[in-house]
Image: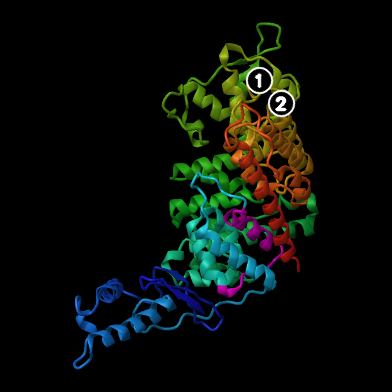
Amino acid sequence: MTSTTNPTGTSSATGTVGTTGTHTAGTTGTNHATGSNSATGRNSASTSWEGLVTSALLGTDRRKPPAEIMSPGKEASAALLDAAALHTVRRRAGLLPARAAARPDPAPGDDRRPLPEPAVRRLAQLLADRSASGGGGGGRRGAAPDLTELLPQWLAAANERGYRAPASVLPALLDAARARTDLRPQALTFAGPRGLWLARLNPEWKFALRGASGGSVLPDTQDTEAVRLLWEEGLFAERIALLSALRVQDTQAGAEAHGQALAQAGASQHALTLLDSTWSTERAEDRLMFLDSLRTGLSGTDEPFLERALSDRSRNVRSTAAELLSALPLSAFAERMAARAGTCVSMDRTGAGQVIAVEAPHECDADMQRDGVIPAAPSGRGERSWWLGQLVEAAPLSAWRAGLGGRTPEEIVALPVLDGWGDELHAAWCRAAVRQRDARWSAALLGPPTASPAAAPGTPSLAERAKLLDTLPSAERASWVAAFIAAHGLSEAFQLLGVCAVPWAEPLGRAVVDALDIARDAGSYPWSFSGVMGLAERCLDPAEASRLELLTATPDEPEDASPGAGGYWSEAFQRLVSTLRLRESMLTELAP
């Protein structure tokens, strides 16, 4: 263990975790409590330490040390130093004074392969930079890479390669995950079962026990009794992980027994049986999270369970069950919604038949409410349009071809809609395409990337268009965004870039760099592109670094350029190049 002491007398320590059952937890100016510490013990330790610090700063002549450390015949200064030494050891160990308690069970093993030593050093550097990084100050960042923003990518790469976290970094890793929710899934996966073991010993890390599996050690899914015990007695995170493992196992078994085409139909029955056995006694928030976990591997086997969940006492559970059922186009729920939506949206029969007519619902009956339609409209929204939108977004998109004259999605979204219902109808189709992950409908609603967003057949909202893009295959998505940037520049592309696969495909990466180069040469206000530049640092292919070297020079500034823009652009491109090279080094260090 290494430690440092600052001028105020507080200390920080980096602890280690072993498999022998002992542990230390890292601290930075605060104590990590373990064992059975009471509130009284915590307050006593804090008061005593503060009293020692005050006496040391003012001098024992001006401020006597706390009476409990004094003994007859002992000088105040000597008693102060003895007490400070005792408290320093306790603080470095990450422990508060407490009565002796039983040792925790030994930490479980982790069979994943050890991290290469260069990668261990890199991870320590990334975690150490977490609190030192300036981010969010709004000023110039300089040419140095922002290590904080590289930590999520490093964790993802390490997990893909099957490495386990070194014991020495677990406290810092859990602290990082506590501070940043975006890190938690990858950090807890990397921390593995030993990270979950350590989290049980520190209340500040209790998030790890609910929010994710934390790499918990699961029993053999064929061991019925062990599975039952974990389901009935395990942590919530372990139960979620168990459900996922059972669904994966059932899918694989179905594939082996029936062939890949029938695997989904026979999947997840074991997991559903387990979930159904305790469903009525679970808390509403837990039922919601259990239900949400069914998104992975969702199939027709889940339909009976989801149908029962439509009658759940929690409105959120009912809504989630309806959403999942609407993603099953062959379900009875989807058929009911298709029938309702079909009575509201049809081809106009009074004219030439080349326009869509809409007759929104006049009431939200009990059957609609049972199927998840919320009767009360939000403020400022008409009830009929609110009900219509919910019906259309829950109806299977495949039903519209027959209902609207056998037309393709591209032809349907191009049809005019009577009486001003077009925006409402198209917005509902967009939500349906996202929910059902229908790439063809998404592409039709997006329209060509060269068209103005305001003229898009689906929605002009960039946030909604980003959701539609996310349903397309990654290569098609990257090509669409690259063409959009070439036609409209970067100012409207930030949200769209966020859904593209990392590293960016070559056409997309070149489109972004070319657009930044054009903005620089035009003398554009440079700080308005800082968000895109930050994305480029994390998402560009590291192989682009050499091509970007030419852009690191300070350009000549046009007369109408923002003052100092050239220096900023040079600095930003230097940081981009150095970050790409650092990412390349990170990946090399993670090589087996």
Residue 582 lies left or right of residue 34; in this view the side is right
Q: Position of residue 409 (x, y in %)?
A: 73, 26
Give the magenta part as a residue range.
144-168
Local secondary structure at mark 2: loop
Q: Is residue 156 magenta?
A: yes
Label total for image: 2
Q: Mark 1 points at which residue?
A: 455
Q: In this view, does 340 lie above or below 541?
A: above
Q: What kind of secondary structure does the magenta stretch mostly adopt?
A: helix
Q: Mark 1 vs mark 2: which is more N-terminal?
A: 2
Q: Position of residue 370 (x, y in %)?
A: 49, 36
Q: Nearer the viewer, residue 264 or 182?
A: 182
- Quadrant hosting residue 441: top right
Q: Name the residue under label 2.
A: 447
Query: For the residue carrying disc 2, how many other residues have a C-alpha within 10 Å: few (<14), some (14-19), or many (20+)?
Result: many
Q: Is residue 243 above or below residue 171?
A: above
Q: Nearer the viewer, residue 451 or 572?
A: 572
